[in-house]
Each structure stands twice: as structure tokens, then as C-alpha cells.
Image (cartoon, rainbow, N blue to C red):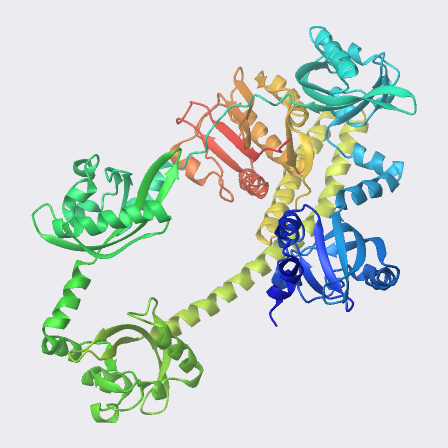
Amino acid sequence: MSKEPKQNEYFLKGKEEKYKLILENANDLITIINENFEREYINEKAYLDILGYSNEDIIGKTPITPLHPDDVKEAVKNLRKGFKKGVGRNEFRIKHKDGHYLWLEHKGKTFIDTDGKRKAIIISRDITNRKNSEQKLKESEEKHRSLINNLTDIILEIDLKTKVTYVSPQCYNIMGYHPAELIGKKALKYIHSEDVLKIAEAMKEAFETKEMISVPRYRLLHKNGNIIFASAIGKYVKANATERFIVTIRDITVRTKIEQRLTESEEKYRSLINNLTDVILELDIKGTLTYISPQCSNIIGYNPSELVGKSALKFIHPEDVVNVAELMRNARDTKELINAPNFRLVHKNGDIIFASARGKHIITNGMNRYIVTLRDITDKTKIEKKLKESEEKYRLISENANDLISIVNDELEFEYVNKKPFLNILGYNYDELIGKKGINFIHPDDGEKIMNQFIESNKSFNDSIEARVKHKLGHYITTETNGKVFLDRDGKQKFLFIARDITERKKAENLIIEEYKKMEEISKIKTELIMQASHEIKTPLSSIYGASQILLQNFKEQLGQKPIEFIEMIYRGSQKLRQLIENLLDVSQIESGKLNLNPQEENIVDFIRDCCSDLEYWAEKKNIKIEYELLEEIFVKIDNVRMEQVITNLLSNALKFTPPRGNIYIKLDVSDQWVEISVRDTGIGLSKKEIESLFQKFGKIKRVTKDKDIEFEGSGLGLYISKEIVERHHGEIIVKSDGRNTGSTFTIRLPISKE
């Protein structure tokens, strides 16, 4: 007996369609089970909405089936008890079809159906939210405190007199105050005077209406006097006879951001397009060309300027226009790819060009367009046409080809082979192959691959297949094979194969692979040697550096002028050598993949100021002015040690290559996705050639001036290391300069942390 009649028998016999309609549209789960605990009816719509199960998933199965394993024993006990007593109630977890569990409250009652059989009707209600609320109430105050302390927003509790009774630790990050400095103080004291009335009125309204406080924008006063823009949402509560306001405050200072779009280099894009052999074209929804790559002149004789703004259909053979237009409409309506395997174009000189096209319909910035790749298949089409017209002509070509050409039937038996290549390459005569199965000549390990491709192919093999073919003398040669299905004059399906001997190429490829592995091993040994040598040098160097530093600091007056000069030379030399060793260790870590980051949320504004402060003495010494254009507060996830290394390197380079009385500008810009830190100087600038090699290892700038105030010493590793560090932060570093004596601008672009 099918399940469906069994489900509906309660309603059909009683002819109570009205009740069936109510049951089927109920919000709760309604289930009827028999004494074997098998479900005989469910209101499928509710089951689908709440648990994701259909009739097919549930009918005939026991209620135990989707229960949480920990609830099964108790559930069985309750079902038996309920059938015995006639009523029952319990709460258990039921597994949703997608795998998660929901808490349901079940109430049941037994009844006798029209056949005199005892059944039970169970009404189940989703109480997951209630159970979750109960669970939350059981959590300890410490857990809540931990949760609050790890929020980024401020949680604030104030009494009706606006006195702060509790504030979460985030107040320090946002306002500069510790909680102890705010508890017991009037909250309005820390609000901008022009916004106090707005906040007071919002609190008054919340008190009177018992609705939410919602202040989307107001100003707070930071401990250092800065203005902090914030939003607040909260409500009036009364608990244990105590009236108060609970408020969440969010820092929204970075709400106005400068929009900048990341654009790719037009030259790089143009170079990529221009070096393709196919034509790339863009059309609007009406088929008008909005862009076409230069290859169009090679294929149809027109320059791009002659085509842009014209209808693409104008250059298609009249007999093919309708078909191509239909493909474009279909791509727009179905979102499927445009695939025109063979159609005709009209060359500028009137010739017919056979082409294939693949593309798709896209929508960008609300504009409908088509992006299409056009390929000239004139030669291919002509070859196919000539094959049909004159088999003998192509037999002559085949017999004189350097590749192996064969035709096999459905049984994979050779019907044709080009005699000369098969004899020269494989050693077989024509009569030794005709009628034999081609698969028998394939290496056993390659046979299955060939057969699978043979079976799956309809018209042609999409990819070349490499396989080993047995020579008459017993050894194997490696071939690269392409194939095509065709129908002969009698309408029988045949397969054309063209195979090329690539044995020597494979040997060369294998040799290259082996050599590459050796080079990798040598590189690894080199990296380890550098790291080991650097560590060995670092220990005695630290002693020299430290000793010279102590002599200069503590014994300067006791030593004569001449010894001091030598000690200073030792100190400066060891300092430079120490920096070189640190750089070499960093390079070794980069090359060995061991340069690890420990990113933390940092206020990038304070971070930049801290990095720059260490070098301001140098700027003063060289009479160079550093100017800042920074925002108030931006949070970015960075490794502060490594990023300090980058910023210090850029600023020290700017100081090196900027003459006295010059300027250095440090600017911070923010977009939706990026934080940009730029260091611009008025120094000697960079040539285009220098920029190209700037971020390479040992990419030093050669001396271009006799100015003694310009320093050129360095390892040439700093910018290479900086670039690697920035890229490991998923960012990039960009340099711009208009040439010699025009200054330079280095920009670090980092992904911004979201609020």
C-alpha cells in the first residue's frame, strides 16, 4: 500500500476537508503515529518550513529517527508512557535536514481511529529561541564580562541622572579614558557641548516612551581633546526596582572615506591584448562595437578606429547574420556562453573569412554588453572542405606528412595509415596494420586513458593526448595525438587520428625537470648557508658593536681624540654590517618561505607617528622639514615590527636622498578597501630605469651627484625586503618619480580593517 493514501485516510473517511486545510497550513508540526511509533501523517508544509523534511523523508519512520542521540532514550520512554496514559508532553532536540538541531516542545494525545486502532496525534512547536534564551540566562556573569570586554564597541550603563554606573574597557581605545576614570561621572560631560541637548532629549524620549535610544551621529570628547564621532543605540530598562539606560557606543570617526579606484596599468593591459592572436571585442546590447583589439586588421583588414561605433553585424556575411544575432539574444536571456563555432566574416577587400566566436553577456555598472573572443578559422575550414571534396588529394598530403595519420572504424581497427611515416617512425608496413586494433599497439598503462577519450568524444578530442606506442622492435615511442570524428561517404562514423613523435621532446622535458630540481636544491643550500653564516657572524659582531658603544658612552673622556675617531669608525662600520646581516637574514627567510607575520589591529595614525619620531633627529640634523597629513584614527591589521621596518626604510631613504633644506611629506589616505601611506620627498628623484630595478635584490641607486649631503651607502636589500613584507600583508608598494631632481613618492597600500 502506498504512503499517500495512508496519510490521508483520516481525512477522506471523515470527509473533513476543512480540518485538513487547517492542519496543512498550521505553523506547528502535526504528526500522527501508530502504536509502533511509525509516522502515518505529517503536515508537510510545516515540516518543510521548520525541519526541511518532506513526506518521503518522514512517513513510515519513527519519531526517534531525527532525534539528537542524547535524547533518544528519554524520548522512547516518554512515547511509551504517553500511549499508556493517553497524553504526554516533552521537549527534545530534532535534527534539521541540513544537519543542525532544533529544540521542539511536543504535546500528544492518543485516540482511536475509524478502524479501531490506537493512534497518537502530536503537536510540536519550535522552542529553539526559548531554549537558547534559557541557556544564556544560565551563563555566568564572568562569561558576559568576557564577551563585553572583547567587543569593539563601548557598552555603557548610566542611571537616570546620566551618571556612569558601568563602562566597558573599550572606552580607553575610543576615548582615551580607563573605566575607573568614568565610573561615577556624568556621561554628558564627555559629549560635545553642541550635542548634549540632542543626547538628553533622546534619553528623555526613551524614558517616556520606553522605546530605543537611537542617535546615529554625535561627538564625543577624547581625553587628549580630539573630537570622536560616534553613534549610540540603547534603551531604558527597569530591573530590580532600578531604572537605568543601557547603551552601545560605536566609533564612526572613519565614516567619510576618500574613494579611489584601483586601476591596472593600461600599458600592461594593452600589451597583453596586443600579443594575442585572437581578436577581443566588446559590444553593447545593440551589437555596436565599443572596443576591438588591433588583431582585427590582420583578420578582416580593418583598423580598430574603422570599426568602433559600427554595428558588428555589418561585417558578418548576410546569410549568417540572423544566426549570430540569435546567439547574442540567447546569451543575454539565458546567461549562457555565446558559442558560434563557424560563421563567415567579410574582409575589407571583399574576401570571405571563416571565424569562430566565444563570449558571454555581462552587466557592469548597470550597462549590458558582450565580451567576445573571435578566432580566424579560415584555414581550418578550408582544410575540412578540401577533405570532403578530394580524399585522394589529402591522401597525397598524408603520405608525405611527417606525422602519423590514421583512420579507424568503430571497432578501433585501422582502415588507413600513411605508409611512409608509420614505417619510418614505428617500423610497421601497411599490411601489418590494416585490420588490426590500434589499441593493441598502445602501452598497457595508457590504454584506458585512450579508450575513455575515444568513448567520450563526439566530434573531436578537445585536448591532445600523450601516449606510448610500441615500435616493431619492441621499444616504445611517445606520441602526441589529436583526433576527429567524421562520417565517410556511406554515412559510417570513422575516427581520424594525427600523432606526432615527441619522444625527444619528452626526454628534454624530463631533463629540464631534473635540472630544475637540482637548481632548487642548490638554492636551498645557498639560503641555508647564508642564514648559518649570518648567524655565525652576528654573535662576534654584536660583541664588537656593543663594546664600541660602551667605549663611546662611558670612556670617551678618558681616551684621546685619535682613539675615539677609530672607535667611532668601528662603531659605524659594525652598525652598517649589523644592518646588512639583519637584511641577509630577512632575505633568507623570504626565500625559504619562513618570513612569518603576527598581525594585530593597530591604529595606523599613531603607528606612523611613532615610526617617524625615531628619525626626526636625523631630519633636524640635515635641516629637512617633515610635514604630516594624517587622519585621526584608522585601524589596520599589521605586524607592527615588520611594518615599522618598512616605514622606517622608506623614511630613511627619503632622508638619505634629499639634500638639506628639503622637504618630506607623509600622507595617509583611506578608501573603501585600502589605507594608503605615502612618503614624498624633494630629493634627487628616480629615472625610469632605476624604478624598474628598484625592488630587486641589491637594487642600489648609483651616485648621480657630487653633493656630499646625499648618502648612497646601503646594501640594496631594504626595498626588496619592504616589498615582500607589504605583499605578505596582502598589500602593494608603488613608486612614482618624474625623473632626476624631481623627488620621489613611495606609497604603501594595505587592506583596511572593517568596522
The location of residue 251, given as percent across then percent down, is: 68, 23
Identify the image quadrant of the N terminus.
Answer: bottom right
294, 207: nearer the viewer: 207
Count up the numbered dots.
0
278, 403: nearer the viewer: 278
Report whether 248 appears left or right of 707: right
Report whether 708 appears left or right of 50: left
The answer to whether 193 is drawn above or below residue 107 in the figure is: above
Q: Residue furthest left?
A: 350
Q: Could one spot residue 360 in this view of the protein?
A: no
Q: Residue furthest right?
A: 240
The location of residue 373, given as percent across then percent down, is: 29, 50
Give the residue displayed 67% in from the left and 55% down from the top: 532
Identify the image quadrant of the C terminus.
Answer: top right
Give the residue displayed 44% in from the left and 82% down from the top: 445
Report whether 326 appears left or right of 212: left
Q: Toward which corner of the image does residue 736 lie, by quadrant?
A: top left
The location of residue 452, given as percent across then percent down, is: 40, 76
Report whether 445 appears left or right of 37: left
The answer to whether 341 is drawn above or below residue 282 in the figure is: below
Q: Toward which corner of the image does residue 623 lie, by quadrant?
A: top right
Q: Toward which corner of the image does residue 381 lie, by quadrant?
A: bottom left
Q: Could one spot residue 151 in this view of the protein?
A: yes
The answer to whether 284 is drawn above or below residue 374 in the figure is: above
Give the residue displayed 19% in from the left and 49% down from the top: 322
244, 2: nearer the viewer: 2
Give the residue displayed 17% in from the left and 45% down from the top: 297
